[in-house]
Image: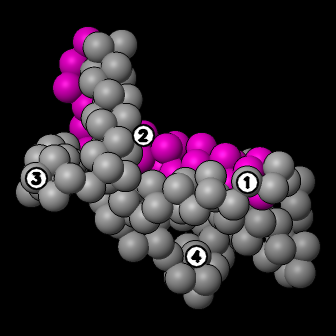
């Protein structure tokens, strides 16, 4: 079953259950997907939909940080609920050990020995993450490994 179908089914279920948070969140994501399809002039592939979901989660995490600074606990709680809805459709994130193993593999493949070669490593590593780790986590891991080794 593809992600688009799962989103549609979850939206229908949220409508039936009168789940306002899920309904609002899924409506926004479905609109973002539709807009991307219109922009590209074709239906999106699974990887594109995953990227949109990750972007939506990232945006909400930034919102949480801003809401915490502004002292708005209700907004933090609402946004965390939205993230929980979105994460149901994302693959399980890599563990620290899995991410480190992939990073070491990419470093070895690139023949990198210093942080100056980080770009080469990241070009190899990013396609392998497939939505299971964000670029920030990956770059921190690669930088740490290159500095220590």
Pointer 3 residue: 16
Pointer 2 residue: 52
Label 1 neighbour load within 10 Å: few <14, some 14-19, many 20+: few
Who is closer to the viewer here, 11 or 34? 11
Label 4 neighbour load within 10 Å: few <14, some 14-19, many 20+: many
Pointer 1 residue: 72
Q: Please, what secondary structure does the residue beneath circle 4 have?
A: helix
Mark 2 or mark 1, which is nearer the start of the sequence? 2
From this viewpoint, is residue 105 visible? no
Mark 4 or mark 2, which is nearer the start of the sequence? 2
Q: Quadrant of the C terminus?
A: bottom right
In this picture, is 37 found above or below 80? above
For this view, does 24 lie left or right of residue 79?
left
User: Which is in the foreground here, disc 1 or disc 2?
Assistant: 1
Residue at figure coordinates x 83%, y 49% from the top left: 70
Residue at figure coordinates x 58%, y 49% from the top left: 60
Q: Position of residue 132 (x, y in %)?
A: 46, 65
């Amino acid at each position: 079953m593809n992600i688009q179908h799962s989103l549609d089914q979850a939206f229908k279920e949220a409508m039936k259950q009168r789940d306002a948070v899920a309904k609002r969140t899924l409506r926004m994501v479905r609109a973002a997907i539709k807009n991307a399809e219109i922009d590209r002039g074709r239906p999106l592939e699974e990887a594109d939909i995953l990227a949109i979901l990750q972007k939506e989660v990232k945006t909400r995490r930034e919102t949480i940080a801003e809401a915490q600074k502004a002292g708005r606990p209700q907004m933090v709680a609402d946004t965390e609920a939205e993230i929980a809805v979105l994460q149901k459709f994302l693959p399980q994130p890599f563990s620290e050990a899995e991410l480190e193993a992939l990073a070491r593999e990419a470093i070895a493949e690139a023949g990198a020995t210093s942080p100056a070669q980080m770009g080469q490593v990241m070009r190899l590593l990013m396609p392998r993450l497939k939505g299971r780790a964000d670029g920030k986590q990956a770059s921190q891991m690669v930088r740490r490994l290159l500095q220590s080794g």
